[in-house]
Image (spheres, coloured by chain):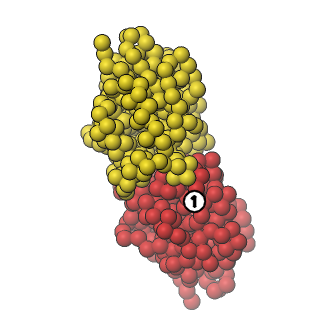
Chain colours: A yellow, B red
Amino acid sequence: MARKLGILAGGGILPQRLVEACKSSKRQVFVLAFEGQTAQATTFGVDHAWVRLGAVGAALEILRGAGVDDLVLAGPIRRPSMAELCPDKQAFKILARAGARAFGDDGLLRVVMDALESEGFKIIGVNDVIDGITAKPGPLGRVSPDETARVDIARGVDVLQALGAVDVGQAVVVQEGIVLGIEAAEGTDGLLARCAALGREGPGGVLVKLRKPGQDSRADLPTIGPETIIGARDAGLRGVAVEAGATLVLSRDAAIREADRSGLFLIGISVGQ
Amino acid sequence: MARKLGILAGGGILPQRLVEACKSSKRQVFVLAFEGQTAQATTFGVDHAWVRLGAVGAALEILRGAGVDDLVLAGPIRRPSMAELCPDKQAFKILARAGARAFGDDGLLRVVMDALESEGFKIIGVNDVIDGITAKPGPLGRVSPDETARVDIARGVDVLQALGAVDVGQAVVVQEGIVLGIEAAEGTDGLLARCAALGREGPGGVLVKLRKPGQDSRADLPTIGPETIIGARDAGLRGVAVEAGATLVLSRDAAIREADRSGLFLIGISVGQ
């Protein structure tokens, strides 16, 4: 019997996919949903509990009570202010331990994961639950990037690696070397929507989306899906490059179909970390 | 008699301010306006010519014909694609000389400035024409940043310096350590408008705007004005930090009045480059 899986459920459909995968494989599963973060549908038909993000003590008690062995972090968590977070004693401890690292998304996540492991849970990655959910290297669909697009991808990688050093940013849009937009708190959909109005004439730009340098692959990985391809197409882009092995591709078949239909490339790239 | 000034006029009102400053000081002035970039009003009542951005040969001929000695670069130039630029022979030479540096805003600007100087023009800064137009160190208005705001400013400086290494980005919005938005091609007004919807509860964030590390102070410096303060206020921010000596403050009195009225700080900070 596989160990019982607890899903710390952020937003979007990924947590639901994990529940489905567990049901298919008859693995026992429990969802910990966060108020204002998790989609309601994630909790339908599965054992679950709702907690505030700042209620770490209650969350740990619930997970232990549910008999969870492994934990997976899935779906984006919108970072709250301290006032919204309203941290309990154990959340405070985590924040204190994080110190200055709490400023970065990744730094904070790492401290949270350490705290969970020290409580006896084993943290696993989404790709340990759903096999083959991350992008493979090379073109996923029929279209490949041309030389101009490859140069833009390289420029995007440079910018994201520089940003990664200060633990922020996972996506960038580049057209003929010009950085049209950099993602921060607005998310990739917001980035793409904005870049629609910023594009220049000539060959369209590219979206580059990477894991941050040193980011734990069990933490919230960059995620794309069919809506990313549609957003890229609507922004006049020519394709999307994601980090192979470190980007979750949701609804992969639909995403590739959408890319092929729109003539966009969707490629998994390898990046020196 | 002061040397005749040529203004390479980008967008916004700064080029007009320079024309006014020359008229006040009886300095001879000539405006080179760029199609699709310069505001029409910049050319009213002053000797001028319009050229395409890519017509470098024609531009040089016009500047020589006008008897210009010094040149000042003023106002933002929206970077065109190669197709829009439609470079002439001399523009091609500049782009070829720039090579990979042409990708960055600053790298390209530096090559353009070198090319202009090798043609015998002397490039001067906006602050050589209008005395005291850059921000001074310390609070410009009545409000000073508190400790939370100072920590956010420091975080913003870190992010901008990391981005500066890849020659992109001049502004960032930070709230309680969370990077809400990073400016690329959309401009500071676009950044502020977007951050209005991204703010968390609790103490509002700050806008930090810096010159890029190593950016020539004669090149297009970061610029703020009253509309920046209004945008920051509407985004729920608590203040604006700019680099002392390296940020142009347009309509300074109005900007300070607006900051004081809204209870925002406006501060010039010194940054190790």
Closest to the observer: A143 or A115? A115
At which x and y percent is residue B248? 56, 71
Q: Residue at x 58, y 56 (%)?
A: B202
Q: Residue at x 53, y 23 (%)?
A: A42
In the rendered image, the vertical position of residue B148 relative to residue B187, given as above or below? below
Q: Regarding mark 1 in the picture, which secondary structure is present there?
A: loop
Look at the image and tell me whether residue B29 can be seen.
no
For the residue marked with disc 1, what is the amino acid?
Pro
Quadrant assignment, res A35: top right
Q: How many numbered circles are shown?
A: 1
Q: Residue at x 27, y 41 (%)?
A: A273
Mark 1 burial class by Cα count in 10 Å: few <14, some 14-19, many 20+: some
Q: Mark 1 points at which residue?
A: B203
In the rendered image, the vertical position of residue A87 relative to residue A190, given as above or below? below
At which x and y percent is residue B265? 59, 71
Closest to the observer: B7 or B200? B200
Closest to the observer: A131 or B102? A131
Point out the image quarter for the N terminus of chain A: top left
In the rendered image, the vertical position of residue B62 relative to residue A202, given as above or below? below
Q: Which residue lies furthest to the left in this view?
A: A272
At which x and y percent is residue B35? 63, 55
Q: Which residue is drawn at 37% across and 11% down?
A: A25
Q: Which residue lies furthest to the bottom in this view?
A: B1
Look at the image and tell me whether residue B266 can be seen.
yes
Q: Which chain carries label 1?
A: B
Quadrant assignment, res A30: top left
At which x and y percent is residue A102? 40, 51
Left or right of B154 on screen, residue A192: right
